[in-house]
Image: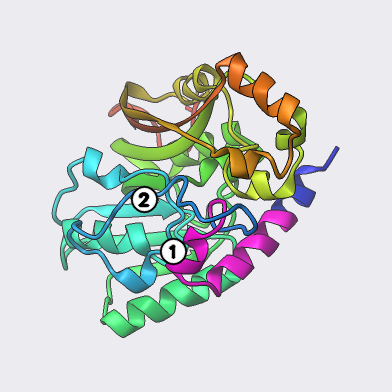
Amino acid sequence: MSTAEDLKSMIREKYTVIATQSKDENATSCCGVGGCGDYTVFSEDYTATEGYVPEADLGLGCGLPLSSLRLRKGETVLDLGSGAGNDAFVARAAVGEEGHVIGVDFTEAMIEKARANAERMGYANVEFRHGDIEKLPVGPARVDVVTSNCVLNLVPDKEKAFSEIFRVLKPGGRFVISDVVLHGSLPEKIQTAAEMIAGCVSGALQRSQYLSIIYRSGFEQLQLVKERAIELPDEILLQYLNADELKQFRDSGAEVLSITVTGEKPAGSCGCGTGCC
């Protein structure tokens, strides 16, 4: 069994490679990690979104999270797993020049690419910090909104991740997260395949378990605002399963789902986390 640090190292290695690829190259692989055939399995189209920067879009998301939450001028937004800066730049367009956007990613190559994109665009109110979502490089009660797009499924300790989101949000702050969850079980060969872990599938929790973690973290007003099934093509699955195993999986009714969830930190809560007051 791989340790959490082993998983992080593997994911960091694979996403370092992804950072050197274009969106078109990533679209011919399984969530960007290679070898899965000519499919854009997860990503949605950003091209009509205000603030979209094509060079920052590596096609790695599984939703359009910021389309489900109204940002206000002057707000501070934190983007977890910011990659090349795609969602951070969309957030910047919404909060305006008076707002501030922070992106956090633990892959240094992604941070370098995002910073280069921000510098090229002349965005002085967007910054990118190298750090771990389980221990965010952000102080308590500092941000108005937290967003993330197809990233938290990669974090080994999801309870710690949501605890950190709660900590850094101001009282009354909101989050909007798109992520991958499961309904039913994946075959063991899929669960243990490194490409499917880094490809946002094997690290996914059951939908009910995922939502329960958010609730236990102290958030209120939880809403599942969008859900869609992600069809993993046979050509992808047959790289890991034989024909009989594939049939068993299809017959089981198990699904990989993209969900977008919103919620709020209670206005009267303290800034440091649940149970700390």
In the picture, measured across the screen, residue 109 lies left or right of residue 51, that is right
Relative vertical location of residue 207 with respect to residue 15 in this rendering, above or below: above
Observer-nearest residue: 268 or 16? 16
| Residue at the outermost front position | 243
Number of the label disc, if any, that sits on residue 189: none
> What residue sits right under mark 2 in the picture?
142
In the picture, measured across the screen, residue 23 lies left or right of residue 249, that is left
Query: What is the span of residues highlighted in magenta in the rendered image?
Result: 9-31
Q: Element at badge 1? A: loop
On the image, the x and y values in percent for residue 220 come to 34, 22
Relative vertical location of residue 147 with respect to residue 172 in this rendering, above or below: below
Q: Can residue 126 be seen by looking at this rendering?
A: yes
Which is more foreground, mark 2 or mark 1? 1
Q: Quadrant of residue 224?
A: top left
Relative vertical location of residue 143 with respect to residue 52 in this rendering, above or below: above
Amino acid type indicated by mark 2: Arg
Q: What secondary structure do most residues of the magenta stretch adopt?
A: helix
Q: Quadrant of residue 203?
A: top right
> What residue sits right under mark 1 in the picture?
58
Observer-nearest residue: 89 or 180? 180
**First in residue order: circle 2 vs circle 1:** 1
- Give the mark count: 2
Amino acid type indicated by mark 1: Leu
Which residue lies at the image location 48% right of the left edge and 51% below the top edge? Answer: 39
On the image, the x and y values in percent for residue 98 come to 16, 65
Relative vertical location of residue 248 with respect to residue 125 in this rendering, above or below: above
Q: Is residue 19 magenta?
A: yes
In the picture, measured across the screen, residue 12 lies left or right of residue 275, that is right
